[in-house]
Amino acid sequence: MPIIAANFKTNHTRSSTAKYVSLVNNYLKTNSTSDVYIFPTATSLDYFETVANLHIGAQNAYATQNGSFTGEIGTEQLDEFYIKTILIGHSERRHILGETQEMIAQKYQYFKALGYRIIYCVGEPLEIKESGLDATLQYMQTQFEGIDLSYENLVVAYEPVWAIGTGVTATNDDIVNVHQALKKQCSKPLLYGGSVKLGNVESICQLDGVDGVLIGTASWVAEDFIKIIENTKEL
Ligand code: PEP
């Protein structure tokens, strides 16, 4: 059964998030699936009573317990809601918010030391993809600098930048080629992300080396996300 994760990015409110989590949780109460993750906005984090395989995670946090880091949240704010899962290295944080590999590695080390489940995202921009598979794999090595790939609580997500939020999904060959190469390097669960939706999730989840999916846009309507889980739970 594949791992299925929903990244809300900057969408949903506290109240719509609570409704969403409740719908997904009710579905999971009567359906057996692998791990399901929901990453709401920081303002919508809360303590949700859920089944054991539904995990609420933070899209981001600063590598601190608390302190003077205006606009950031630390582990004090996550601990309030027993949140122990975090996304690190998402392409929007790398390319829009300007996180460098050094900052990302520092964050990774901090949350690793605290035992968080880390969903660590890597992926190449279009110009690198156009230079071929070797260039793509080489580029991703730079995104593994300072990252302990043997960390027991790690899930890796391969998300080509050009496929995120664009409606352009990587081809099956693209996904298999990269996943097979990454699998040689790292034995952790490996998700694919980039314009995954109801119409392609089943076939992507069946590809060699794909252990699940990280979904942005197509996850934002709870009923659609539940259908995605439903359509992949027998795989
Ligand atoms: C993401 O945010 O990780 C993502 C893959 O987005 P989308 O599904 O919209 O491409």
Image: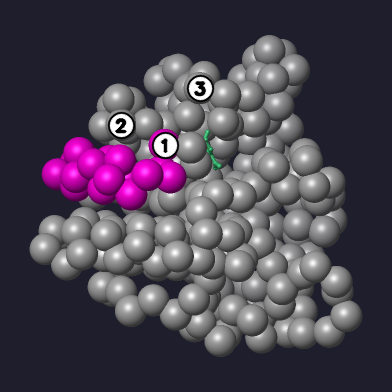
x, y percentage for residue 28? 21, 62
Type of secondary structure dominating the magenta stretch: helix
Query: Left or right of 7: which side holds 37?
Result: left
Q: Amino acid at mark 3?
A: Gly
x, y percentage for residue 135? 71, 23
Tell me if residue 145 is in the magenta stretch: no
Q: Which residue is at 73% across, 84% downward?
A: 65
Tell me if residue 227 is in the magenta stretch: yes
Q: Which residue is mark 3?
A: 167
Magenta highlight range: 218-235
Q: Earlier in the sequence, mark 1 or mark 2?
A: 2
x, y percentage for residue 106? 78, 65
In whole angstroms, how far apart are the C-alphas of marks 2 and 3? 12 Å
Above or below residue 174? Residue 109 is below
CB of mark 1 near ligand 1 (< 8 Å): yes
Query: Left or right of 211: which side holds 99?
Result: right
x, y percentage for residue 194? 51, 32
Q: Is residue 19 visible?
A: yes
Q: Which residue is mark 2?
A: 198
CB of mark 3 near ligand 1 (< 8 Å): yes
Above or below residue 166? Residue 218 is below
Q: Which residue is mark 1?
A: 218
Q: Are marks 1 and 2 in contact (CB under 8 Å)?
A: yes
Q: Quadrant of residue 197?
A: top left
